[in-house]
Image (spheres, rainbow, N blue to C red):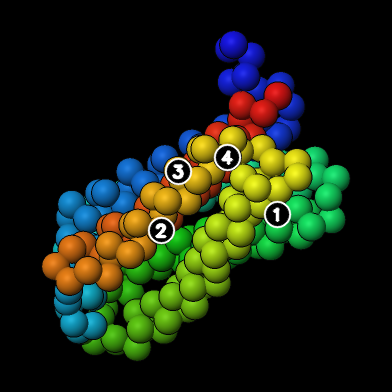
């Protein structure tokens, strides 16, 4: 029975990396909520001072998020390499590019935010420009989450599926419930909406156990 959870080929390794990356990202989101980066309403003017004061924590959290997205990017690359389906190859290629965009966004953030925040009072335009570039790259990267839902459904109901239907439905239900609850007033919308990151965990688990 243990053979179902071994790493016997590139697809299994890709699945393991997706599970690992997804779990890391989910944990970091909990820490973002704990320090008040998400789940707290604040005006745009309050963001720079918050980033500056909480930088030691944010740098660590975002650094781990980079690691999580890097694992997922490697998984997409392995799945692209081993794919024999044109449609799946297209999926993995687009997902890989979107995830690279996320990694670049975090790279700019970790490499330049603090320096720009130190001179924010004198030159706010530097931080504003960097934040604008990061948000654009991050928005492109988040498109991958929408495509991931399509991939999840394909791997659950498709002809050559890798996710057991019961697991696939459970994962999709968690995401739908989380997204719906994120619109309920008074609930931490960003935290609940983060359940969408369970999708790579479910997809990865399907590939990991599919020997």
Residue 107 vs residue 159, the one in the foreground: 159
One can see residue 50 in this view: no
Label whose residue precedes the other's in the sequence (1 or 4): 1
Look at mark 3 in the image and give the residue it sits on: 170
Mark 1–mark 4 distance (CA, rounded to whole Å) = 21 Å
Give the side of residue 6 with respect to residue 82, left or right.
Answer: left
Label whose residue precedes the other's in the sequence (3 or 2): 3
Label whose residue precedes the other's in the sequence (4 or 3): 4
Which residue is found at the position 73% from the left and 32% from the top?
A: 10
Mark 4–mark 3 distance (CA, rounded to whole Å) = 8 Å
Mark 1–mark 2 distance (CA, rounded to whole Å) = 23 Å
For label 3, the SS is: helix
Look at mark 4 in the image and give the residue it sits on: 165
Percent position of residue 32, x then y: 26, 55
Quarter occupied by residue 99 = bottom right
Answer whether labels 1 and 4 touch (C-beta < 8 Å): no
Answer whether labels 3 and 2 touch (C-beta < 8 Å): no
Mark 2–mark 4 distance (CA, rounded to whole Å) = 16 Å
Direction left: furthest residue? 186
Label whose residue precedes the other's in the sequence (1 or 2): 1
Give the side of residue 211 with respect to residue 32, left or right.
Answer: right
Look at mark 1 in the image and give the residue it sits on: 92
Look at mark 2 in the image and give the residue it sits on: 176
Q: Is residue 152 above or below residue 54?
A: above
Mark 1–mark 3 distance (CA, rounded to whole Å) = 23 Å
Residue 187 vs residue 30, the one in the foreground: 187
Q: Nearer the viewer, mark 1 or mark 4?
A: 4
Give the side of residue 32 with respect to residue 148, left or right.
Answer: left
Q: Nearer the viewer, mark 1 or mark 2?
A: 2
Quarter that holds the C terminus:
top right
Answer whether labels 1 and 2 touch (C-beta < 8 Å): no
């Amino acid at each position: 029975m243990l053979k179902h959870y071994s790493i016997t080929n590139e697809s299994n390794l890709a699945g393991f990396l997706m599970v690992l990356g997804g779990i890391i990202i989910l944990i970091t989101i909990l820490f973002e909520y704990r320090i008040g980066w998400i789940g707290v309403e604040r005006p745009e003017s309050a963001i720079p001072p918050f980033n500056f004061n909480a930088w030691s924590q944010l740098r660590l959290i975002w650094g781990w998020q980079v690691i999580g997205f890097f694992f997922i990017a490697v998984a997409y690359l392995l799945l692209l390499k081993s794919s024999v389906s044109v449609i799946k190859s297209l999926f993995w290629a687009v997902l890989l590019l979107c995830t690279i965009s996320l990694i670049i966004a975090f790279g700019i953030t970790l490499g330049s935010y603090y320096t720009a925040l130190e001179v924010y009072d004198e030159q706010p335009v530097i931080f504003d420009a960097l934040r604008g570039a990061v948000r654009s790259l991050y928005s492109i990267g988040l498109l991958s989450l929408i495509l991931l839902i399509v991939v999840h459904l394909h791997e659950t109901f498709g002809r050559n599926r890798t996710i057991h239907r019961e697991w696939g439905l459970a994962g999709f239900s968690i995401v739908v419930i989380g997204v719906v609850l994120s619109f309920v007033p008074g609930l931490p919308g960003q935290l609940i909406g983060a359940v969408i990151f369970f999708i790579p965990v479910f997809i990865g688990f399907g590939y990991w156990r599919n020997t």
